[in-house]
Each structure stands twice: as structure tokens, then as C-alpha cells.
Image (tube, coloured by chain):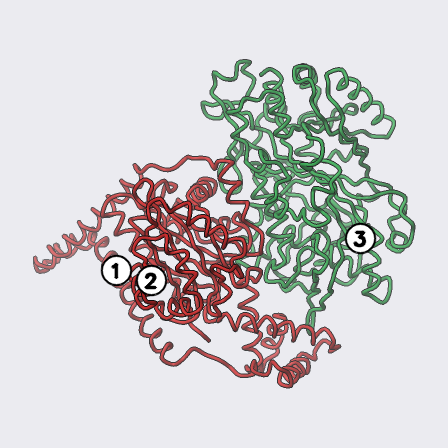
Amino acid sequence: MTPQNQLAFVIAIKEGDHDALQKVLDQIAIDPAGNTIFPFAASTTTHFARWVVIPGTEEGHYLLVFSSNFDGQSRRKHLEEWFSVNESGFDTILSHCVGYDTGATTQKKVRLLQTKFKSPAAFYIGTRGHSLEDIDRDFKLRDFIRDFVDTQNFKVGEEKQLIDAVKQKVKDSEFNWAMKSSSYPLGYRIKKFFQKWYDFIRLGLIAIIVAIGLAGLVGVPLLFQLGVHAAWLIGWSVLTIWCYYLLLTLRKKEKTDGVSHERISIERAHALGAVEDIYLQNQMTHLVTIKPGQFRAVLSRLALWGIYVLAKHVFNKGTLGGIPSIHFARWVIVDKRLLFFSNFDASWMNYLGDFIDKASLGLTAAWSSTMGFPKTRFLAFGGATMADRFKRWARNLQIPTQVWYSAYPNYSVENINNNAKIRQGLSASLNTDKKRKEWLARL
Amino acid sequence: MNLFSYHDHKDIQGLVLFGYAHAPFAKYLLLEFNDPAGTKNWLNDVADNITRKSKVFDVERDVFNIAFTYDGFKKLGLPAKVLEQFDHEFVEGIDTDHRNRVLGDVGSNAPQHWRWGGRHNDSIDGVLCVFARNEAELEEDISKLKDQLGKVGVRVIEELDALTLPDHKEHFGFRDGISEPILAGTVKHKSSSKTANVVRLGEFVLGFENEYNEINTSPILLQSEDKTDVLPYRETYKDFGRNGSYMVFRQLKQDVPAFWKYMEKQTSDTEEMIKLASKMVGRWPSGAPMTSYPDGDPDTDLDGDQLDGFGYRVDDLDGHKCPIGSHLRRSNPRDALKDTDDADESNMLVNRHRILRRGRVYGKPSSATMDPTELKNNPEIEETGLHFICFNGNLATQFEFVQHSWLNRSTFQGLYNSPDPLMDPREDKDFAVEGCPVSKRYRNIPQFVHTVGGAYFFMPGIRAIKYLANV
């Protein structure tokens, strides 16, 4: 298995160059995989990628965003790999950007872009551990097995014989690589193990501190009656007052902050729809300003960090809070704005419906501190459950993605993860009737 | 906002909530308004004669309902402020490049081949749906209406005939129109013990709470703008949309011999042939659900609960009885959505995407008894198909969602390359019949159903029609 990572850099577009750059991106968008300027398919490790122009914080200024999801861990190496395949493509595009010198050495260019990297505030992977190469050959493997099974006439109760026949067939074929089990490199597993505990302990500590603070309302008077040392009482009281102050501040803001009632204009719906549902997969780029003030800035980072930890260590089996259709999703903070990228299966309406139906708590928490978001209660409640308002809010802040690339635009998350389980089954013992039936049902 | 009031009963057009089973003969007239002033006068005159919910069981003659396209509303002078508040799917209409992809109107289904409703066809302003107990009465009622329409500059673009086949079958020979949501708060709801299929009014009629506990957006205007003061209120506003419903109308041509010939080619005898077709449909020809009667068509009269009161989760989650990819199961997955482990939650999620089907078949079948072997072998008498009509409160989350995310999505519930075996326009699709030791895969299923026309309409309440007649 191979770990995946993400890359995003944000670079200012030269004043007056917006239209010229747009023309270049339009050219690429005609055929993202194979165009002559920036053929994405030239990379054998890039799953998804996009070039997006977002407005700057000042009138008339624009920023160019590059974002990708790739096999490997190092963002620098990924960028270097891109440069080694297609430096001229970067030159054509980034010559319109501030500070990029097309005459500089490759090393210098990469170093410049490294300073423009934006780390994600939260990141989710739906097909975790499956490299581009795995995904491709697992599909071929599944087709191979399925075609073979179609020619067989085993009867009910002969599950074991059928599986043995499949294994023999695979062993004797060009697919015999699939008979070996695979796992992450040892170093990566150790790193992940420690990361997980480090993250959970931090998350737990914050939760415990807040819980102790809130419990002070009952706890402090109780300890006072028991005659506990004054220093303890004062300490706890301060924490309690602080917690309740924050909670009341949040509630007050939630009650008074403005929400958007804007309708989706026909033009917007039409423009966004024009590039949707061409493949099984769709994408979304969404940009919204975080509400002003330190309070909201810290709160939104904290909420996103919580989601990050859960997405990494809990929702790592193909669903994000019950949503089975997200390949990669990411939140990035750019100039006090929350930028969201997603690559998902099926329609926008299906995707947003899943948000509302299955993951409204997490998503409300993620966006509750952004402008115009439907009214929330205690950070994670309300908000996205207001279906119609949430959809309008989301659609109105969605921005067109100038260039979007998927290495496998018609593969679903479910198919990819199922294929991998079919492969893994070949090297597993499948020693019970139940396991055998489950594996056969995957075909 | 959870129950119809006395006024609502008198306001909602009958077809939204009833199938008019007592009137088996029908015609749909597609209309073009050439004299808006005259048309409005006519609407004003007939508004009170339009068949409404409260009168459905009283009227025997002149049973008719009317619905409008966006173009039609615009022609009749509905203010821009009201027009722009309709859902944009309705405003744009059924034929846009994006919507073609969403609905599967591509390839041979593409609107350039349509007979009506596409951007290349005459623009449609409205549809008049007329129902009668027998052919003679239908002809009489129609000629009376056409006479009136002719006088007010309304051209009938297309006259679409519909009929009712024995045992309410559709043309492939399967009993149709069985699954239907039960409306919350109605008599049927109160007398039923099952709650899984109960859906709130707002999913189908504007002005009421839907399954998200919200009231759908609806075109509203200021009180002062309703000069004749006929429209119902929505808080302090006047609501043009209340008691109205978005109506989808699609003409679907069915290739009946091809359907049965494909089944015959894949199987060894008639019994197996019918079984495979039933697996694709999800019901036996009699309408008995595969999931409750996996071994054979019981061919006895089943009651409502036996026909429609079933779920998949307890006995058939893996699809060994009713395939996961069958038309029935994907158009209404009931309690078996794989996204959740909970039957109730699945029902709740599914009920946010329901439609009320009101379509009827057209064309004489080649077999009077709808016998599969005869349908397969007899020469066709005329073109046969379905005038698919459905009502919903939100086109995007209901009709379009079902069509795109459930029916035509080739990876529905984890399947591979398997869109709806009956409806999807592709010819390289697979269909899996789940079973032991392993599922059986059918490949390269041809296209059996072809879209040949379609439009999005809005069927307003009677009061909204009166307002429209006087703007």
C-alpha cells in the first residue's frame, strides 16, 4: 500500500494578466489529461489536480491556485517530479504570476513555489492507501476474475471450489502479482501510530479542559463547601468563567450573525452545471470568508483541526461521516478565507444531499464560522440541516474550476475500495463460509 | 402547515393527488397560446370547472387539469418577479445540455430526435390533461374543449392519446403504478399500520412542510401586488405556488419485442425468460414483489400490504431475491440503502426523494392478454409506450435525483457498470442477478426504452390560476 498526500500552492497573478492566463487555462481545460501545454496524464502519481483562479482580497487582484492529490509523502518531491516532466508547462502558466522567473533554475522555481505552499486545515482521503497504479491494475484484475467467473458453473455450496479455481487462474496469469499481500512501509506505519496517539491525546486534552471548565458551575461550589484549598477554587473558577464566557460569546454571535438568504441565480446554476455530470465524478471549489475577529478565526481552525484528526484516524475506511462518495476533500485557509476542494462521485445535488443527510454535524462545525452560513447552534448543530438554505449558500459560493483533472473520472470510491478488497482476498485464507460468501459477493 | 385545510382541498388540482382510476381513458393536449388576453379570459371562465381535489369523486364528465411551462406563464404575463422565483430547473426547462446528461437524454434519447418539448420543437406553453370513463365521452369532452380553445387563439400542438391496459399493466406486461407514497395526515395514512412509506405533503405540494421540515421555496409576492386578492397567504406574503406542484411529462417509447427477445436469448425456457425479466423489473408480471415471492409468480390477488408493504433489509439485503440493480429497487431503495445500518434511517433518507407517478400507457398492445410469449412474437400493431407523468415539490432533489443518482448511475450501491436495465440509454450496460455461489452477470443489454418527448410543467392551484387570469 502507498500513502497519499496533497499539495496546494497559491501565487498572485500579475496585475493585468488575468485574461491572458485565463486563455491559457481554457486551452488546457479542453483536454486536461492530454493537452500540449500541461498534460496531467504525464504524471503517473497524480490522482486529482486543478488550476483555479480565485479573487484576491483587494479589488482587481487575483490569485492562482494549484492543487493536487498524489502518491507519496513529500510535497517537494511531487513538485520536482512535475517539473522534471513538464517544466515548460509551469513556465507558460506561472509566467503570468508575481515573482516567478521563467529564466531561473528549476531548483529556484521549486523553492519559490515551496514558499507558496498552503497546508490543509483538514484533509480527507476516501481511497486511502491505493496508488494510481494499484487502482488501475485492481480494476483490470477484477475484470479478469469476473470474466473467468462468468465461464464457470459451480453450484450452491461450492464456494470454496470456485474460490480455489479463481486463485489458481490468477496464479497462472499475468495477474499473479495480486497473490502477494501488501501493506504500508514499516516506517510509515510507525510514524502513523505515533501520530495517531499524539493527535488523540491533544484532542482529548482540549475536550477534558473544556469539560472540566463547564463542570465548574457545579464543582466549584461543591468544593467550597468541602473546604478545599483556595488556590484550587480560584483556578477552577477562572477556567469555568473563561469557558462560559466563550460559550456565551459563541451563542451571542450565533444569534446575531447575518445569514445569507440569497437565491441561486439562473446564470450561476447554468454556468456551474455546464461542466458537471460529464463523467461519473464531479468536483467542487468553494471559497468563503471567515467571519471577522480573532474569536471566529481560532474557532474555525480548531473545528477544522478536529475534523482533520477524525478524517485521518477514524474515517479512513472509505466514508466520511457516512458519505461513501468522496475521493479526496480538503480545506485550506487563504487570507482569512476558507477554500474547499472536493472530488466526488455522482451529482452535486447528490453530494450536497449526503452532506445534509449524513454529515451535517461535522460540516456545520467546519463552516459555522464563515460568512452567511445558515444559523448554527453550539457550533455543530443547525446549519447544514437547513437543507435548502445550506444548498443555496454552498452553490452561491462555489467558484468555477478553470482546469480539473481526474486520472480515473469514471471510477467510484466504492468500486476502487471493493477492488482492493477483492485483491486482498486472494492472499487471505478465507477460511469460513461467511468470509467466502462475502468475498464472492464483492465480484 | 402539515395538513390540507378546507381551502386547500378546493384549491389543489385533482391530478396531483389522484390517478383517476375511474376514468381509464385520457388525452393530453400540448398547447401554444397565441392570444394571451383571450386565453386568460378562458382561464377565468373555466377555473372553477377544473377538477380539484375536493371534487374528484363527484364529477363524471369534463374531468380535466391544466399545467403551464415557464414560457406559458411568461406569455400570459406573470410578473418577472414571480417568474424568477421558480426553481431554476423549471425556468431552464427540460432540454439543456447539462440536464440532458442528468436525465440520460443522450444518444438516441437526445432531444434532437424528440417529437415535442425539445429546443428544436415548437415551444410548448401548457398542457391540458383530460380524462373520461369511455372513449365516446372522451371524444365529446375533448371536442368541446378544443372548440373553446380554438376561439381564444390556443393551438393544439400535439394530441397524445393514453389508455389503460388490463390489470393496470404497462407494455412489457408488468402491473404498474403500485408503489405510491402515502401522504402524511391523510385518511390512508391514519388507516395504515406501516409508517415507512409515509411522506409529508410538502414533498409534493408547495406550501407545506417537506421531509426536511422545511417549506419549499415558492414564488411569492407582496400582498399589495395581488390586486384581485385571490392568492393564499404565506405569512404576510401572497403565495402563487401554494397548492401547486412541479409536473414532469416524458413520452417514453417501449420496444416490447426487443425486450422479450433479449430475455429469451439469455434463457432456456419461457419460465426462465419471465423470471429474468422480473428480476430486472423487481416484480412479477402480476405485480407481486420478487423480494416476497422469489420462487414464482403467485398470480393471486394480493392486498396492498403484500404488494407494497415490504422492505428489503431483513430478508433480502444482499439482493438474492430482488436484485440490487433492479428497476424497482433502485427507483425506491426503501429500507435497504447501504449507506446506513438502520432501516428507519434508510426509509427517512429515501423519502426525501419520492415522486407521485401519474402516467398512463399509450398504443395498443400486440397481445390482448399481455402474455409475454405473444408480446415477443406478435407483430406490433402500433407504437407503444408510456406517457410518464410525475409530480414533485422540487425537481432537482426528487425527479432528477431519482433519474440520475439512482436509476442511471452505473455504480449505484456499489454496482459495476450497471445503470437501470430498463431505462438507461446505453447499450454496453451490465445487469447482475445476485445469488450463490456468485452473482450472474448479463452483458450488453440493449436499450428498450427511448425518450421521444418531454417538458417540465407547473400545475398551479385554482386560486393561482385565477390570479394568472387577471394579471
Q: Secondary structure at mark 1?
A: helix
Relative to A140, A301 lies left or right = left
Which one of the lettered chains is coloured red? A
- What is the residue that sits farthest to the front in this orientation? A103
Residue at (59% x, 70% y) in the render: A139
Name above or below for residue B186 compared with residue B353. Answer: above
Name the chain under label 3: B
Q: Which residue is mark 3?
A: B285
Q: Amino acid at mark 1?
A: Ile
Name the foreground residue: A236 vs A66: A66
Residue at (47% x, 40% y) in the render: A388
Q: Which residue is mark 2?
A: A103
**What is the x, y in percent for residue A10?**
34, 55
Relative to A138, B54 lies left or right = right
Comes first in the chain, label 2 or label 1: 2
Discs 2 and 3 lie in a common subunit: no
Do the numbered discs 2 and 1 sit on residues whose CB atoms are within 8 Å?
A: no
Task: Work out how far the residue at label 2 is from the one at label 3, CA to CA, in angstroms.
Answer: 74 Å
Q: Colour of chain B?
A: green
